[in-house]
Amino acid sequence: MALKMEKRVRIIKDTGSYLYAECRTFLGFVDDVEFMAEPQANLLHIRSASRVGYWDLGVNGRRVDRIRDRYTDILKGQVQENK
């Protein structure tokens, strides 16, 4: 899974169609990351949010972009998924 390639990630809940994880920033802040799959609609919803503060210097947006790009590459067969 593309999330496993991220640093400092702890998976809290995984039901198959829903995944909740905590990501620690390099400064030690905890961000919440959620994934919800809708296979029938061919969709993967991704949410990443800081628990504290008003601005995260773009960390969550970049995280979502990296994860989305990895999933896209995996689906295109360009990258072998780490297992």
Image: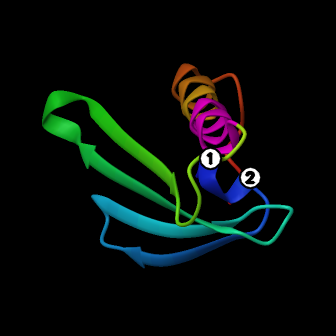
Amino acid found under the numbered disc labelled 1: Ala
Residue 42 pos. (x, y %): 25, 29
Q: Which disc is residue 5 wearing? A: 2
Residue shown at the point (61%, 44%) measured from the top left: 60
Q: Quadrant of residue 77?
A: top right
Please state if 16 lies on the left or on the right of 69 as rendered: left
Figure check: 24 above or below 2: below
Residue shown at the point (52%, 66%) measured from the top left: 51
Residue 44 pos. (x, y %): 34, 38
Residue shown at the point (32%, 64%) measured from the top left: 16
Q: Quadrant of residue 46?
A: top left
Foreground of the two, 77 or 30: 30
Dot 1 lies on which element? helix
Q: Which residues are magenta?
A: 58-67
Q: CA distance from mark 2 to mark 1?
A: 6 Å
Per the image, is 59 magenta? Answer: yes
Residue shown at the point (30%, 51%) measured from the top left: 36
Figure check: 47 above or below 8: above
Dot 2 lies on which element? helix
Q: Main secondary structure of the magenta part?
A: helix
Figure check: 56 above or below 76: below
Q: Residues within 10 Å of mark 2 (few under 14, many from 20)?
A: few
Per the image, is 6 magenta? Answer: no
